[in-house]
Image: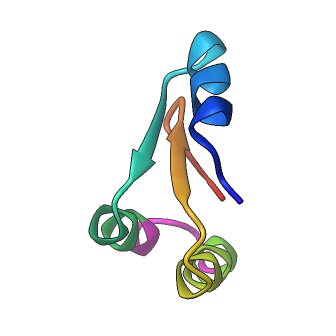
Amino acid sequence: MFCAEALNGINEKYEAILLSKEEAKRRIKDAHKYDQERFQDALDRDEPILEVDGELLT
């Protein structure tokens, strides 16, 4: 389970943004095909998608 403390810890070292589902869907379209499938699977499981220093992470 994702927690706010983890995001706060990330933000101490990196610029991290928790993306909304709509924003994540828009960003996924620009990713490589392998990454598109991985991120879509994460969205389907209701997992959060972060943007950390310009990179998408699950």
Q: Is residue 14 left or right of residue 19?
A: right
Q: How many marks?
A: 0
> Could you say which quadrant of the image residue 48 lies in?
bottom right
> Could you say which quadrant of the image residue 32 lies in?
bottom right
Residue shown at 65% from the left, 25% from the top: 10
Quadrant location of the N terminus in the rendered image: bottom right
Q: Position of residue 19 (x, y in %)?
A: 39, 53
Query: In front: 47, or 51?
Result: 47
Query: In front: 51, or 45?
Result: 45
Residue shown at 37% from the left, 74% from the top: 25
Compared to residue 9, the image places residue 48 above or below, namely: below
Stretch of the chain drawn in magenta: 28-33
> Could you say which quadrant of the image residue 45 lies in?
bottom right
Query: In front: 30, or 14?
Result: 14
- Is 15 in the magenta? no
Residue shown at 65% from the left, 12% from the top: 13
Q: Position of residue 22 (x, y in %)?
A: 28, 71
Q: Position of residue 29 (x, y in %)?
A: 40, 74
